[in-house]
Amino acid sequence: MMRFNLLTVLLVLSLLLNGFFLGGYWMARIKAAKVTSSAQRVNEIARQLHLTPEQKRKFRELKSRAINIRRPYLRRMAKLRSRFWEKLISSPTDDHEIDKIIHEMAVEREDYQKGIAKIITEFLNVLNQDQKEKFFEISKDNKILKVLLSG
């Protein structure tokens, strides 16, 4: 009887693990199908905004600059967050040092936002009024920023 219960438990456990494995596989496959390449996203935005070849070139150039701003920013912020948590959990906590790190994080974020705003402004300057209106419509869903910053 005990042997039968043990086999039943092992069989159920095996079925559950296989179910989780298959579920994970299908979820990963569905997500991979939704992901498109950076070039495809740029082309989709260019199509929606009816960009000229020159505007499209400018968009790609600005996208590259945005990525070059974002990557170092993310690295610096990761280091600051790490320092923040180290100071937060240390004994005794140093409130002055924590405040200093929070200030550094705020300055980093401000510099990053200013850099991205400058890039967006540069792009807006090459668009006509209809394109700008469409840009703002698309931007409501952050689609433009996702394309601009992905890479």
Image (tube, rainbow, N blue to C red):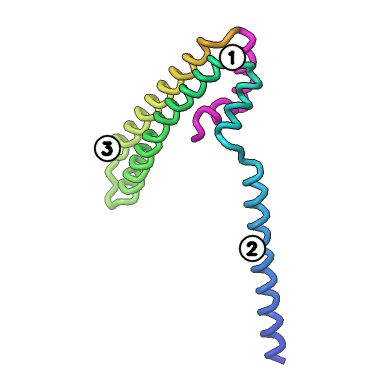
Label 2, residues with CA under 10 Å away: few <14, some 14-19, many ≥20: few
The Cα–Cα distance between marks 3 and 1, rounded to whole angstroms, is 53 Å
* Residue tagged 2: 21
Residue at left offset 61%, top offset 7%: 129
Residue at left offset 45%, top offset 27%: 64
- Amino acid under disc 1: Thr
Residue at left offset 36%, top offset 30%: 108
The furthest residue to the bottom:
1
Q: Is residue 131 magenta-colored?
A: yes
Number of residue marks? 3
The Cα–Cα distance between marks 3 and 2, rounded to whole angstroms, is 48 Å
- Amino acid under disc 2: Phe
Q: Which residues are magenta?
A: 129-151
Q: Where residue 144 appears, x then y in whole percent? A: 57, 25
The mark found on residue 52 in the picture is 1
Residue nearer the viewer, 51 or 35: 51
Q: Is residue 48 above or below residue 149?
A: above
The Cα–Cα distance between marks 1 and 2, rounded to whole angstroms, is 47 Å
Q: Quadrant of residue 81?
A: top left
The mark found on residue 96 in the picture is 3
